[in-house]
Image (cartoon, helix red, strand yellow):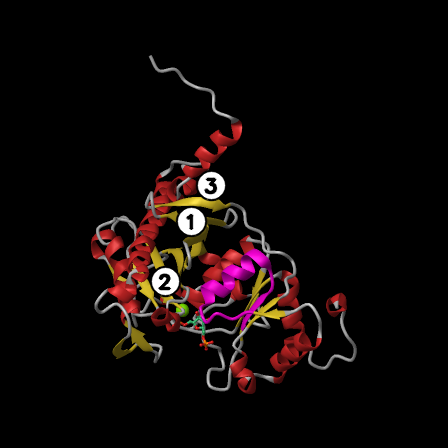
Amino acid sequence: MSRLVEQPEEQEYALDRDCTTLSRHVLQQLHSFSADAQDLSAIMNRIALAAKLISRRLSRAGLVEGALGFTGNVNVQGESVKKMDIYANDVFISVFKQSGLVCRLASEEMEKPYYIPENCPIGRYTLLYDPIDGSSNVDINLDVGAIFSIRKQEGNDIDGEARDLLQDGRKQIAAGYILYGPSTVLVYSIGTGVHAFTLDPSLGEFILSSENIQVPDHGSIYSVNEGNFWQWDESIRDYIRYVHRHEGYTARYGGALVGDFHRILFQGGVFLYPGTLKKPQGKLRLLYESAPLAFLVEQAGGRASTGTQNLLDVVPEALHSRTPLFIGSKEDVALVEYFIQDRARESEPAVMARS
Ligand code: AHM
Ligand code: MG
């Protein structure tokens, strides 16, 4: 006859953690099994399925016919589209079809929102996403990501222009990203802290790997494409000259926002994508790139700014609007803002006393 054997405490804890899947974690965070909580949990579960499908294709991309390279088309942003961008975009659409969860999807790859009419009577949510962030890394087997944001649909999108979505970042009810690196990691927040899940391929499940992540108040990393130096405003050049001339800074730039942000979330520092001569509002799109990461960073105790405004307060003019982005540790974002906002300084401010 079998008999229950007492487990050592650590073993019990490890087992419990191994069973903390994403959908269960959402319910735990909300302390509820209400219909709204179940919906959010199911939406996260669907996003996890999209991540698994995309992760699978990325991990075999060099072996699969038609997975790499460009399609030959240009998207609404004027950027050349990669085959993986289209695949990943379609995956998100497919996983939400007939889910009853999300009525509308909006992404970097689609000029207008995509409706799933069969979901609309009950699924009053919109999912905004960047299906493959850092597309230039795809063909050379470097890290890429995906970014997502969930908003409750308010009012009616009568003309299909999604004007009801033109609201600030505080209207997000959840946000997160997926990092396809050596392992696939999903980081999310529903406004109760920031939590990371790692895909265990042997289980096919995202398992909790870091809970309540806090970004350090300061970090040594600055992450920016310095090739744009000549295109920046003088204030940004001054900031970069400052970090060049002071000890304690180190540069890291991977060409994929998700990867660069992930490093900063865990280790501190600042990511910068300022306006340039060619793109005065920078490159990054507000609704499905900057605002979701701003939501996460604030939940982790950090900050996101356009240089003159808290990023979560920015109201976009259009679905694909861009903003400059400075995001990361509180003190490091404040230092960049200082350069932008007070170029006429006479002496070094207190925040610069660190070095
Ligand atoms: P994408 O979503 O089309 O890949 O564009 C966004 C990416 C970010 O991941 C990254 O930070 C940035 O573009 C890199 O741009 P640049 O090559 O100008 O440095
Ligand atoms: Mg992107």
Residue located 38% across and 36% down the image: 33
Q: The disc labelled 2 sits on which kind of residue?
A: Tyr
Q: Nearer the viewer, residue 99 or 83?
A: 83
Query: Looking at the image, is 9 positioned above or below residue 347?
Result: above
Residue annotated with mark 2 = 129
Numbered range of the magenta stretch:
252-272
Q: Quadrant of residue 219?
A: bottom right
Residue located 50% across and 58% down the image: 295
Residue annotated with mark 1 = 198
| Quadrant position of ligand 2 | bottom left
Residue located 47% across and 50% down the image: 196
Is residue 219 shown in magenta? no
Is residue 268 shown in magenta? yes
- Foreground: disc 1 or disc 3: 1
How dense is the environment of label 2, judged by Cα within 10 Å: few (below 14), some, or many (20 and up)?
many
Of the two numbered discs 2 and 1 on the same chain, state the one appearing first in sequence: 2
